[in-house]
Image: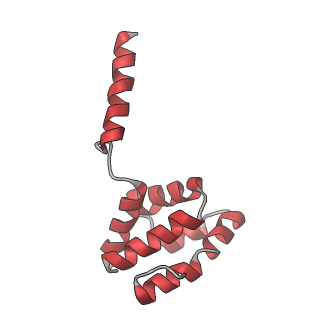
Amino acid sequence: MKAGIVAAIAALALTGCGLAGPSDHKVLVDACVADGESEATCGCITTAMEKNLSPELFKKTAQAVGRDKKDMMTFVGELTVQEQLSFSSVLGDMFACSLTGEPAE
């Protein structure tokens, strides 16, 4: 019993310190940079997704594209219609990021 409590506390401490791994935001930025975009553009795109997608869909995207290295177009094509519509609402901001490195106002 005590070992379980100690393990749970240790896990929480690691998460709080950022030692449990990079954030969803960071893994998406890193994946984008690895595809050849600038860090500013990737940060902008990731911020637009984080702002406009549900937390669940953003997390799902980070897992698939950032951690599992799935191609973004393949990933989006495998989503439900509702999830695809959520992504379509972010396209304007993502396009503005690609042009300027800053989100649309």
User: Which residue lies at the image location 38% right of the left edge and 74% below the top edge?
Assistant: 42
Give x and y (percent) for residue 38: 32, 80
Q: Is residue 4 above or below residue 9?
A: above
How many numbered marks, from 0 up?
0
Q: Horizontally, is 4 left or right of 88 in the view?
A: left
Give x and y (percent) for residue 46: 45, 69
User: Which residue lies at the image location 41% right of the left edge and 60% below the top edge?
Assistant: 25
User: Which residue lies at the image location 33% right of the left edge and 52% below the top edge?
Assistant: 22
Give x and y (percent) for residue 75: 53, 66
Colour treatment of the image: secondary structure
Residue 97 at least partly seen: yes
The quadrant of the rendering that contains the C terminus is: bottom right
Q: Horizontally, is 88 left or right of 47 in the view?
A: right
User: Which residue lies at the image location 62% right of the left edge and 63% below the top edge?
Assistant: 79
Q: Is residue 38 above or below residue 23?
A: below
Give x and y (percent) for residue 74: 53, 70
Q: Horizontally, is 60 left or right of 30 in the view?
A: right
Quadrant in which residue 52 is drawn: bottom right
Residue 71 at least partly seen: no
